[in-house]
Amino acid sequence: MLTVFGTMALDTTRTPFRTEVRILGGAATFASVSASMFTSTSMVAAIGSDMPAENLSALRAKGIDTKGVVTVQGGKTFHYDSSFDYNLSNRTTNKTELNVIADFEPVIPEEYAQSEYVYLANNDPKQNIKILQLFDHPRLIACDTIEYWIEQDRDGVVRMMEKTDIVVINDSEARLLCKEMNLARCAKKILSFGPKFAVIKKGEHGAILFSQDGQVFPASAFFLDEIVDPTGAGDSFAGGFMGHIARRGRTDFRTMKEAVIYGNVMGSFAVEDFGVKKLFAIAAEDVEERYEKYRNLVQF
Amino acid sequence: MLTVFGTMALDTTRTPFRTEVRILGGAATFASVSASMFTSTSMVAAIGSDMPAENLSALRAKGIDTKGVVTVQGGKTFHYDSSFDYNLSNRTTNKTELNVIADFEPVIPEEYAQSEYVYLANNDPKQNIKILQLFDHPRLIACDTIEYWIEQDRDGVVRMMEKTDIVVINDSEARLLCKEMNLARCAKKILSFGPKFAVIKKGEHGAILFSQDGQVFPASAFFLDEIVDPTGAGDSFAGGFMGHIARRGRTDFRTMKEAVIYGNVMGSFAVEDFGVKKLFAIAAEDVEERYEKYRNLVQF
């Protein structure tokens, strides 16, 4: 079982073409829906009583275990309001309301303690470190982080990474964390904290996987003519990546490379519609079909 | 035979680690040295009497035909002085002296007229259009362009592209030319000018090949831990790309994809030392070895 801990959100996403108000979002949501295509997935998150019940039903309909989703009565769900420019490449934050996630004390249902795989999405690193103590003996722990935490609590981010096996992180955040432009040097620094693998995500340019024993795997992104909403691409990448590792139960470099491609594939689906709409609409066969398409695309 | 028309320069390149003064550079130089690993290559360029004779000898030692290199007596060679920042990712121009290339009236030695392959590097588009009339019946014409010409003479750039089969261009220049952020849409626009193929170069992120019949090939860059001098990477890419096409004598999509990889390979060699030093130091076997390394690197 893979347990994903992170934010569930109600997102308002504005593009020059369309605005969607208070749609289901959040790092844990994208990662869990993606991972659920590969392996049995459970979520830990805090929501407010304003979260529409059909969102939870939709997650459960994808086979996701939402027993770890805590509803804070009278509280409000994390809300993120942002606008994209005409090119959908620059995002402006209009409003961030942490609401119930601000003081969330992580708890997990008893049966989650047996999780073999744990993915810590973009939470407060202190919450991430705390929740790890609630698992009995996870085989593999991965985390991501965001600019906000690197700026607020860099030491906490590093301490969290020390406890993980894999760090999945954006290029700009890797550079910020490592105070270093060269991504190979960023990866070396992150690996020096302890993880066996670092995956640096480069958005439309794909991702690079680095291993502690010096192996490297650069992968182009799946090529799309048009995108609709870039929100959640990186979280969907992480979900597909972890999902594939969990279903294979191995971390040999070949499996890790496949996981990067599945990550790319899930990220490419995510951006084809607003929020998690597209991820909800696809099935495992669609994922495998796009994986093969990707293979044909990059083959030479 | 492949004929390359473009600048030969004396470059002063400053990095925080080292400065090299008046070393051999220029788009035609990088492209020709790269192409010479694949096919018989001849150059057309204008230089001043300040160009050290050993630079021409070094080109001839690589088997390059330099009969088309015109020395303007008493004139000075194109000079470009630039500085890179600590990350070697941002370049500042300190000085650009066009010198003899400013009013160059293109001429070619009689035997070049039979060239089957012509590559027009970053010249004045008017000079490029003129020189094309001097060739009898080239099978394939490719061009690149730079910000300067797009800003000075966008119409000329488009007219030039109308006469070519392949456009090889940087991502930022493609965006500037097409007034469009999305690279797929940039490529469509460039292909609408007439060329059968467009290659958009993305520096450390690799390149994407687009064909007029809707095929796409995204390729990661060859992964390097460290680079020494990014100058000439794109021109070396173009040389390797054209060189492979010329030696195969085909433009089926499979050959074109291989050509993109050979382009990546030549770009990766170029940045490993200042100027053309590394390109002068390698042999055809090194190119094939790195091509296989690349194949292993990106395989999954």
Image (tube, coloured by chain):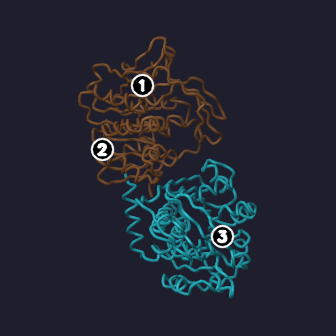
Chain colours: A cyan, B brown
Residue B10 at x, y percent in the picture: 53, 23
Q: CA distance from mark 2 to mark 1?
A: 34 Å
Q: On the image, numbered disc 1 is attached to which residue? A: B62
Mark 3 surroundings: few (<14), some (14-19) or many (≥20) residues within 10 A: few
Q: Are marks 1 and 3 in contact (CB under 8 Å)?
A: no
* Label 3 secondary element: strand
From the viewer's side, name the closer residue of B150 and A145: B150
**Chain at numbered mark 3:** A
Residue A55, placed above or below residue A174: below
* Residue at image location 39% in from the left, 74% down from the top: A285
* Label 1 secondary element: loop
Q: Is residue A119 left or right of residue B266?
A: right
Tag shown at residue B271: none
From the viewer's side, name the closer residue of A107 and A153: A153
Residue B176 at x, y percent in the picture: 47, 45
| Image-quadrant location for residue B126 | top left
Residue A282, placed above or below residue B113: below
Q: Earlier in the sequence, mark 2 or mark 1?
A: 1
Q: On the image, numbered disc 2 is attached to which residue? A: B194
Mark 3: amino acid: Thr
Q: Is residue B286 visible?
A: no
Q: Is residue B204 visible?
A: yes
Q: On the image, numbered disc 3 is attached to which residue? A: A96
Residue A71 at x, y percent in the picture: 65, 86
Mark 2 surroundings: few (<14), some (14-19) or many (≥20) residues within 10 A: some
Residue B251, placed above or below residue A186: above
Mark 1 surroundings: few (<14), some (14-19) or many (≥20) residues within 10 A: some
Same chain? Circles 3 and 2: no
**Chain at numbered mark 2:** B
From the viewer's side, name the closer residue of B105 and A188: B105
Mark 1: amino acid: Lys
